[in-house]
Amino acid sequence: MPGIILIGAQWGDEGKGKATDLIGTKVDYVARFNGGNNAGHTVVVGDESYALHLLPSGIINSNVTPVIGNGVVVDIEVLFEEIDGLEARGVDCSRLLVSEGAHIIAPYHRTIDKVTERFLGKRKIGTTGRGIGPAYADKINRVGIRVHDLFNAEHLRDKVEASLHQKNQMLLKLYNRRAIDVDAVTDELLALGERLKPYVANTSLVLNKALDEGKTVLFEGGQATMLDVDHGTYPFVTSSNPTAGGACTGTGVGPTKINRVIGVSKAYVTRVGEGPFPTELFDESGEWLRAQGHEFGVTTGRPRRCGWFDAVVNRYATQINGLTDIVLTKLDVLTGLKEIPICVAYDVDGVRHDDMPTDQAAFAAAKPIYETMPGWSEDISTCHEFDELPATCQAYVKRLEELSGCRISAIGVGPQRDHIIAVHSLID
């Protein structure tokens, strides 16, 4: 019954594909459990590179059943754009399963997302404008539309009308926009539902049966710990739970069926969008990290904000997720630096904080307390064992492990998918 949760331990874009590759062919199912097409990850197979936003990474592997769980909000148009793009390149997507209980992103969710961000001005959250937040808001407000609603025209029209009743008033009177037509939206969703129907399943039942049969399920989170709506840097967060607990609620699989929780961290830190970021660099060091690490968003193309490794964040991620393992990525990006700072604590108004401040105002005011370690200049991309790394590089990794409170089980040492050192097995 090997259930494995894979999550980002920082603000996202950590490179979860490295961990997925190490687990490799031993995985039978890959299940996305949160978020929507605001997530972006790149899968490389040989010379082929695939940019995925909504589909689970297992879609590329013909031996894996990819699953979109009930915790995901699904933009059906985007889903089929991805499916069509992959099938044009010879990837069979017929194995995909979509939860009948997943909420959908309707066209009006994208409209509301964009006009709201513009209205907020300097107070904007920095969303991707893809309707994720409004879809989750409808879910919590109990006016959301779920996948199984798409197969009953009368029922669906009632739901669309209920959802648009308040939104149209807001569009007209607050944003000075045209009202959205209920019938047009209903017809569009019915057509999309017809195409989606073959993929729809009771995915909770499917995954629980698979685990009971001894198959391996990889629960794949979008975004990352510090963007969790409950445990992240609220309000500058996503609208779902990308932490380990979200894997259970987002798929309908109980916590007793989880065996391992793997967190992925970069050897430095990046963030996209608004919000506090204690180790952010505004000088040439930040530009250097961005250039060396090719730090631009897969989904948005936006340049990522860059900073030194934040051990306070990683300790917090270990605590919140119950991490059993860390996969450290992009260690090679730091090659060539004479010294490498590590944030070990925060200074908040003259008071040292070794742990994450619970007050977001305090976190926003946090100044990093650094310790500095010697760097290395040797090319580490050809290293296959930990002992082959330069001594100063080994010391840096060991210090990150000590500060994070969790073992580092794998290390990314180069841009290619096989540029990785396996220190401990990620699957038993």
Image (tube, grey):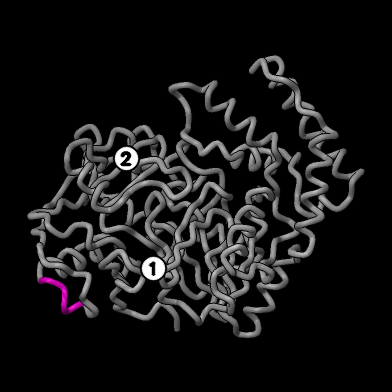
Percent x, y of residue 250: 62, 58
Q: Nearer the viewer, residue 424 or 362?
A: 424
Give the secondary structure at mark 2: loop
Measuring 11% from the left and 67% from the top, which residue is drawn there? 378
Q: In the picture, residue 403 is in which quadrant? A: bottom left
Q: Which residues are magenta?
A: 386-390
Q: Depth-wise, is mark 2 or mark 1 nearer the camera?
A: 1
Measuring 24% from the left and 62% from the top, which residue is drawn there? 331
Determine whether, in the image, residue 366 is placed left or right of residue 53.
left
Determine whether, in the image, residue 212 is placed left or right of residue 282.
right
Determine whether, in the image, residue 228 is placed left or right of residue 285.
right
Percent x, y of residue 315: 32, 57
User: Label 1: how many residues lie within 10 Å, few (<14), some (14-19) or many (20+)?
Assistant: many
Above/below status of 126 relative to 335: above
Measuring 39% from the left and 59% from the top, which residue is drawn there? 319
Marks 2/1 in contact by CB < 8 Å: the verdict is no
- Please state the total of marks drawn on the protein image: 2
Above/below status of 60 relative to 63: above
Determine whether, in the image, residue 95 is placed left or right of residue 197.
left
Q: In the picture, residue 405 is in which quadrant? A: bottom left
Whichever of callouts 2 and 1 sits on the residue coming sooner in the sequence is 1
Name the kind of residue labelled 2 in the image: Phe
Name the kind of residue labelled 1 in the image: Lys
Above/below status of 134 relative to 49: above
Quarter of the picture holding the C terminus: bottom left
> Which residue does the numbered mark 1 point to in the structure image?
18
The Cα atoms of the two marked residues, 2 and 1, are separated by: 25 Å
Say the numbered circle drawn on residue 277.
2
Residue 312 in sight here: no
Residue 253 in sight here: yes
Percent x, y of residue 150: 82, 50
Measuring 43% from the left and 22% from the top, which residue is drawn there? 122
